């Protein structure tokens, strides 16, 4: 339980400087439970607090844990150079909370991307030691063959990697698509593995992280959602490698 004044709460949620948030309250732009609050000395309980600004409703979140269905031609970098950044797909105030992508997808990769403003969560999820399986669907230029699948399961040697990298699961979906499950998150890993195995990727999508499946979330490309506690609990290492 924690109580704060309204302008402090708005500031914590990324809506602007304390001065700007104070002005929002004083100008009568903020309502709590349908009632306009202009009293800047009032202390409010933050847990479960619903407030609206300019008529748009928000729920207080101590930290943000989000899932985005990333479209192609968006960069995960915080300083994008050639395409818009994924942050531009989120409400503006989330940037004010220092929300960041958890790991990266290439600009042309689509699918499940986690985002958060919780440094400990980002660090834990990105840790190389954590082995959370990530599922990708790759479309290939050349047809998928049993030899390609076998090679990816056996492991391929990539430049700058001391040991061969292998998929933990790899299965053919149709003539030019395969599902590949990786536990590492090396730079361009799926694309480089496919090249090393004699094919190459024409499109790539991440469909699952741990037990969290994009298909269960009903997100169209470019849409995002808050992750619930049960969904966060699915982001765990696979039992055989935990
Ligand atoms: N592997 C890749 O090659 N690209 C991605 O975006 C993710 C995994």
Image (cartoon, rainbow, N blue to C red):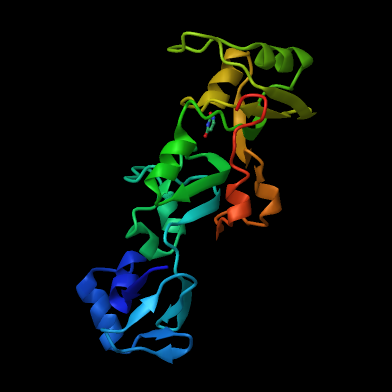
- Residue at 69% x, 22% y: name it: 142
Q: Where is residue 167 in the image (x, y as percent from the top left)?
A: 64, 21
Q: In this view, does 165 lie above or below 66?
A: above
Q: Can residue 64 be seen in this view?
A: yes
User: Which is nearer the eye, 199 or 79?
Assistant: 79
Residue 82 position by quadrant: top left
Q: Which of 162 and 231 is in front in this view?
A: 231
* Residue depicted at 35% across the width and 58% down the height: 95
| Number of marks present in the image shown | 0
Look at 63% across and 56% down and name the residue there: 219
Q: Which of 147 and 166 is in front in this view?
A: 166
Q: In this view, does 137 lie to the left or right of 7?
A: right
Residue 119 position in % (x across, y down):
38, 45
Front one among 22 and 105: 22
Q: Where is residue 19 in the image (x, y as percent from the top left)?
A: 20, 75
Where is residue 201 drawn, in percent x and y?
61, 27
- The answer to whether one can see residue 76 in this image is no
Q: In this view, does 56 lie to the left or right of 194?
A: left
Q: Eyeballing the image, is 74 above or below 41? A: above
Q: Residue furthest front?
A: 1
Q: Is residue 131 above or below residue 145?
A: below
Quadrant position of the N terminus in the picture: bottom left
Q: Which residue is drawn at 43% across and 84% down?
A: 32
């Amino acid at each position: 339980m924690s109580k704060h004044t309204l302008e402090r709460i708005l500031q914590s949620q990324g809506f602007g400087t304390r001065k700007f948030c104070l002005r929002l309250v004083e100008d009568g732009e903020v309502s709590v439970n349908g009632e306009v609050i202009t009293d800047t000395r009032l202390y409010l309980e933050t847990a479960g607090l619903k407030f609206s600004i300019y008529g748009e409703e928000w729920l207080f979140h101590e930290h943000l844990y989000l899932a985005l269905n990333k479209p192609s031609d968006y960069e995960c970098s915080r300083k994008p150079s050639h395409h818009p950044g994924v942050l531009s797909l989120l409400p503006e105030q989330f940037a004010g909370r220092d929300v960041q992508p958890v790991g990266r997808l290439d600009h042309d990769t689509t699918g499940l991307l986690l985002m958060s403003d919780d440094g400990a969560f980002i660090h834990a999820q990105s840790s190389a030691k954590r082995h959370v399986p990530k599922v990708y669907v790759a479309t290939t230029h050349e047809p998928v063959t049993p030899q390609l699948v076998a090679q990816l399961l056996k492991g391929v040697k990539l430049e700058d990697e001391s040991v061969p990298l292998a998929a933990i699961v790899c299965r053919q979906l149709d003539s030019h698509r395969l599902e590949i499950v990786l536990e590492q998150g090396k730079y361009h890993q799926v694309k480089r593995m496919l090249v090393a195995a004699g094919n190459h990727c024409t499109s790539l999508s991440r469909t699952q992280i741990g037990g969290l499946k994009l298909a269960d979330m009903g997100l169209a490309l470019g849409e995002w959602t808050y992750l619930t506690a049960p969904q966060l609990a699915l982001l765990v290492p696979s039992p055989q490698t935990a």
